[in-house]
Structures are given as C-alpha cells and as structure tokens.
Amino acid sequence: MIRSVEDMVWCRNAPEATEGVSGGLLLAACEGPACQFPVRSEGADTYFCAAPVEPEHWASGRQDSRYCPFHRDYLSGCKSLAEEAA
Ligand SMILES: [Zn+2]
C-alpha cells in the first residue's frame, strides 16, 4: 500500500527545508515553482514548505516535481514506510 505524502508528514515530524518558509505558507500564498510539501496543518488549513523548486524540475511532470530538493530527498528516504507499518 502506498501512503500519501500527507500520511507521511502527519505521522511524523516532517522537517522543514532551510530554504523554505518558516512555519510554511498556504497554497494560495505560494507563487511560481514553490515546494508543495505539507509541513504543518492548522485546523482545516495546510501550510506548505514553499522553498524554490527548479523550474526545469517543476516542468518535468515527475511524481515529485512539486517538491524542493530537500523534500525530494526526504521522501526518497521514506519509501520503506509501508513495510514499517506492516
Ligand atoms: Zn520543500
């Protein structure tokens, strides 16, 4: 079973990228290629990392194209989550 990014984040303490916005940004406040890794939720609002994403990576259409290098690294280290939960 593949878990969503949200599951990963909210089950764990997600690290914030040093390039990201401290405390995160609402999606509506993100401009251009900004990391959409959810770092925090407050009520119904979700705050995203918002660190810059390389335009060429953003446009690549890859599954992780909406995440900054820091969070791509973080997610690649989370691939064993499903096995951990088993
Ligand atoms: Zn990020």
Image (cartoon, rainbow, N blue to C red):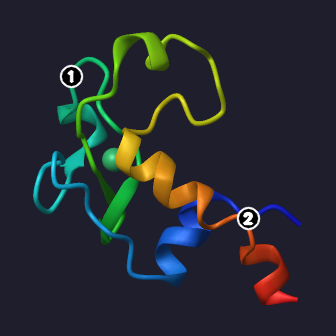
| Residue 13 higher or lower than 50, as above or below | below
Work out whether 53 lies above or below 1: above
Toward the viewer: 2 or 57? 57
Q: Which mark is residue 85?
A: none
User: Horizontal and vertical percent for residue 33?
Assistant: 31, 21
Q: Secondary structure at mark 2?
A: loop
Q: Crowding near pointer 1: few (<14 within 10 Å), some, many (20+)?
A: few
Image side of residue 62 versus residue 12, left or right: right
Q: Quadrant of the C terminus?
A: bottom right
Find residue 30 and report its horizontal and vertical position in percent.
22, 31
Residue 15 position within the rendered picture, expressed as x and y whole percent measured from the top left? 32, 69
Quadrant position of residue 68: top left
Which residue is painted at 36% across and 12% down in the image? Answer: 55
Q: Which mark is residue 31?
A: 1
Q: Earlier in the sequence, mark 1 or mark 2?
A: 2
Answer with left or right where residue 35 lies relative to residue 6. Answer: left
Among the 4 quarters of the image, the one containing residue 42: bottom left
Kind of residue at disc 2: Arg
* Residue positioned 42% across, 51% down in the render: 71
Residue 3 image label: 2
Ligand 1 under 8 Å from disc 1 Cβ = no
Q: Position of residue 53 (x, y in %)?
A: 33, 27
In the rendered view, tell whether residue 56 sits above or below residue 64.
Answer: above
Task: Kindly identify the residue that appears in the image at 60 percent across and 70 percent down.
Answer: 7
Inter-mark Cα distance, 1 to 2 = 27 Å
Position of the N terminus, as image quadrant, is bottom right
The kind of residue on which mark 1 rests is Glu
Q: How many marks do you count on the picture?
A: 2
Callout 2: CB less than 8 Å from ligand 1: no
**Circle 1 sits in a helix, a strand or a loop, which is it?**
loop
Mark 2 crowd level (few <14, some 14–19, many ≥20, 10 Å Cα): few
Looking at the picture, tell me which residue is in the foreground, 55 or 37.
55
